[in-house]
Amino acid sequence: MTTSSEIKKKVIVFAEKRDDLIHPISFELLGKGREIADKLNAELSCVLLGYRVSREQAMELIYYGADQVFLYDNIVFKELNIIPYKHNIVQLVKREKPDIFLFGATHFGRSLAPRVAAALETGLTADCIDLQVDENGDLIQIRPAFTGNILAHIKTKTKPVMSTVRYKVMQMREKDQARKGQIINEATEVPNERGPRIIRKERQAEFNITEAKIIVSGGRGLGTSEGFKLLKELADLLGGVVGASRTPVDEGWIGKEHQVGFSGNTVKPKLYIACGISGSPQHLAGMKESETIIAINTDPSAPIHRTADYSIISDLYQVIPEMIKQIKARKVNRT
Amino acid sequence: MGLKLIVLIKQVPDIAKVRFDVEKGRIDRSSAEAEINPFDLNALEAAVQVKEKVGGIVTAISMGPPQAVTSLKDAIARGADEAILLEDKVFAGADTWATSYTLSCAIRKVGDFDLIFCGEKTVDGDTGQVGAEVAEQLGIPHIYYVSKINDISQDKIKVMSEVDESSYLLESDFPLLVSVTKDVNKPRLPTLRDKLKAMKAEIKVWHANDLSDVINLANVGYFGSPTTVHKVVIPKEKERQGKTFKDVPGGVNFVLDALEAKKLI
Ligand SMILES: Cc1cc2nc3c(=O)[nH]c(=O)nc-3n(C[C@H](O)[C@H](O)[C@H](O)COP(=O)(O)OP(=O)(O)OC[C@H]3O[C@@H](n4cnc5c(N)ncnc54)[C@H](O)[C@@H]3O)c2cc1C
Ligand SMILES: Cc1cc2nc3c(=O)[nH]c(=O)nc-3n(C[C@H](O)[C@H](O)[C@H](O)COP(=O)(O)OP(=O)(O)OC[C@H]3O[C@@H](n4cnc5c(N)ncnc54)[C@H](O)[C@@H]3O)c2cc1C
C-alpha cells in the first residue's frame, strides 16, 4: 500500500530574481500556486536561482505560500543566462517530478519556459490569465489568443503541466511571517556551453506604463510629435502618464515604452483617455480592460467609440485644452 | 562563402478581418485573407539585410496547409532565395511542441545553417513559444526580443535584446536562433518585378514521407501534441456607458462630473 505522502502531488513555482530583488510576479504565482496546491492536496515548492541570495529572501517565498524552496546560489545566475537556468531547472524537474510547473510571463519567463518545456518534452501554455482545477483534478489554463479577441481553455496531457502566467492578474497572499517551511540548498551544475555573451546591460528608463492608474494616450490624430506636449499637460494635471498607439511610435514622435497594444504594453488603468486613436483590434488588445475609457475623436464611426464609456466627437486640439481649463477651474473652486 | 540563413514563417489570417461570433463561440476566418504573420516579415527583412551585408542564402520554411504556398511566394518576393513548405494531413492540429519538433526535423534535413530568424509571436496562436522550442530541439542557443542587429560578420552577431526593464547587448557565435520584435526594422515592400519573379519561383513541398529519415511521426500533429485547445470562449465586451457628446464644453463638463464621482480627479 502507498501512504498518502508517497502520492502527494507537487506544484513548483519559478521565482524570478532580478538583480537584488525577487520579481513581484513570483509572489503572485505563489498565491495562485497555493490555491491550486490546496485543491489538489499538493505540496507547493518554489525554485529560486540567483547569485548571493540571502536567506531572508528565500524565507519571503515561504511567507507568501511556499512549503519549501529549492535554492541555487551561483555566479552563473548573476545575469539572466538562459542555458544555465534551463539546465538546472530541467534537472530539478526530473528529480522532483512535479505535476504542475508555473513561470511568470515576463520576457525572461517567456524565453526560458519554452526551452524547459521542450527539453522535458512537455506541453506549455502561454501567458495565462487564469488557472482552474476542474472536477477531474486537471488544470484548465485560460489564455487570450487571436490578438486578444478570444479566450482559449487549454489542457495538457503530459507532466508536468507547464504554464506562463501574465503579470498582475493573480492575487498574492498576505505575507505571513509565521509560516514555516524548508530551504533546501541545491548544488548548481554549470554547463560548458553558456550561450550568448553579455557585452553590456542597460537599464531602461524608469518609466513603466503598466503601473499607471491614469493614461492619456495619443494616436495618429495628433498629427505631430508636438501634440504629446498637450497630452502631457493633461496627464500631469490628472496625476497620470502619456501613452500612445503604435503609429506615433513608428513615426518617432514618442518612445516605444509608451506604446499600448498587441506589440506594446497591456494596460489596465482606472482611466484611459484615447485621443486621436481609431481603436484598431491591436490597440484594443492592450487597453480594453481599462476601468473607464474616454475617446476623443473627430470621426463618429471610429471603432474606439464602441469600447468607450464617454466619447467626445470633436477635434482633440479643442477638447484637451477645454479639459485642462475646466479641471483647473474645478481645482480652484475646491480650495 | 556567406551565411546560411533560415527564416520561419507562419501563414495567419488578417486579424482585422476575422469575425468572432460571441454567441456560437466561433472564429470565422472566411472573410479574412491569409498573409505572412506580421512579425515574420521583420524576421525575413532581418535575414535579407544580413545577407546583403555579409553574403549568404535565405531559406524560408513554413509548416501549414497547401495554400501557405502563397505566403512562401510572398517571402521570395521579399528577398528569400528559396522556400520549403511542410505540408501533410498528419502535421495538422499541432501545438507549439509538435510544431517546433516538425520544424526542427526539417531544418536538420536542410543541413548546415548559421542563423535562424523567427518572429516574436503570431497574431493567432500568439504564444511566442515556437522559436525557443525549435532552438532547444536543435540544441542551439536562442536570443528573444531582439530589437536591433548591431553587428554581423561571418562568424559572430551582436544584437540588442529587450528583457523587461533592461536591454542587453549580446554577442553570439553560430549557430543561433534569433527572435525579433517589430522594432528591429521596417520590412520593405516588394516591387512589381519581385512579385512577378516570385510567381514563377518553385516552392519545395515536403510531406511526412519526405522527412521519414529524420522524423518520428508519433511526435507530430494533433496526436503528437501535449496540449489541446479544450474550449474557445469569445468574451463579451465589458459593458460601457457609451455616452456621446458633440458639444465640447458641455461634454467635457459632463465627463469631468463623472470622473469626480468616481474620485478620479
Ligand atoms: C502585428 C501588428 C501589431 C500591432 N500592434 C499595435 C499596438 O501594439 N498598438 C497599436 O496601437 N497599434 C498596433 N498595430 C497597428 C494598428 O493596426 C493600427 O494601425 C494603429 O493602432 C492605428 O493607430 P491610430 O489609431 O493612432 O491611427 P488611425 O487608425 O490612423 O486613427 C487616427 C484617428 O484619429 C482621428 N483623428 C484625426 N485627427 C483628429 C483630431 N484632430 N482630433 C481627434 N481625432 C482625430 C481619426 O478620426 C482616426 O480615427 C499593430 C498592427 C499589426 C499588424
Ligand atoms: C486559440 C489557440 C491557443 C493555443 N494555445 C497554445 C498554447 O498555449 N500552447 C501551445 O503549445 N500551443 C497552443 N496553440 C497551438 C499553436 O498556436 C500552434 O502550435 C501553432 O502551430 C504555433 O504556435 P503560435 O502560433 O503560438 O506560434 P508562436 O510561437 O507565437 O510563433 C513564433 C514564431 O515561430 C515561427 N512559427 C510559428 N509557427 C510556425 C509554423 N507553423 N511554420 C513556420 N514557422 C512558425 C514564426 O516565426 C513565428 O513568428 C494554440 C492554438 C490556438 C488556435
Image (tube, helix red, strand yellow):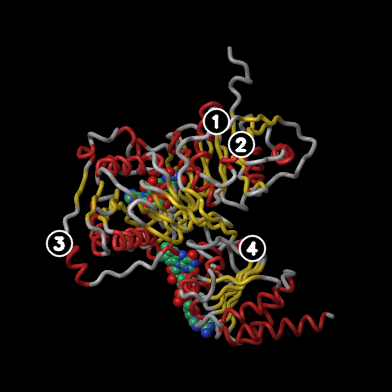
Q: Ligand 2: does it lie within 8 Å of the C-beta at label 1?
A: no
For image coordinates 21% across by 67% down, the residue present is: B195
Chain letter of disc 2 in the image: A
Left or right: B108 in relation to A17: left
Neighbour tally class for label 1: few under 14, some 14-19, many 20 plus, Cα within 10 Å: some
Q: Which residue is mark 1?
A: A92
Circles 2 and 4 on the same chain: yes
* Disc 1 from disc 3: Cα separation: 52 Å
Q: Which residue is mark 3?
A: B200
> Residue type at mark 4?
Glu
* Disc 2 from disc 1: Cα separation: 9 Å
Of B75 and A294, which appears nearest the observer? B75
Identify the element where label 3 is drawn.
helix
Point out the image quarter for the N terminus of chain A.
Answer: top right
Where B63 falls versus B53 (above or below)? above
Q: Position of residue B61 (x, y in %)?
A: 28, 51
Neighbour tally class for label 2: few under 14, some 14-19, many 20 plus, Cα within 10 Å: many
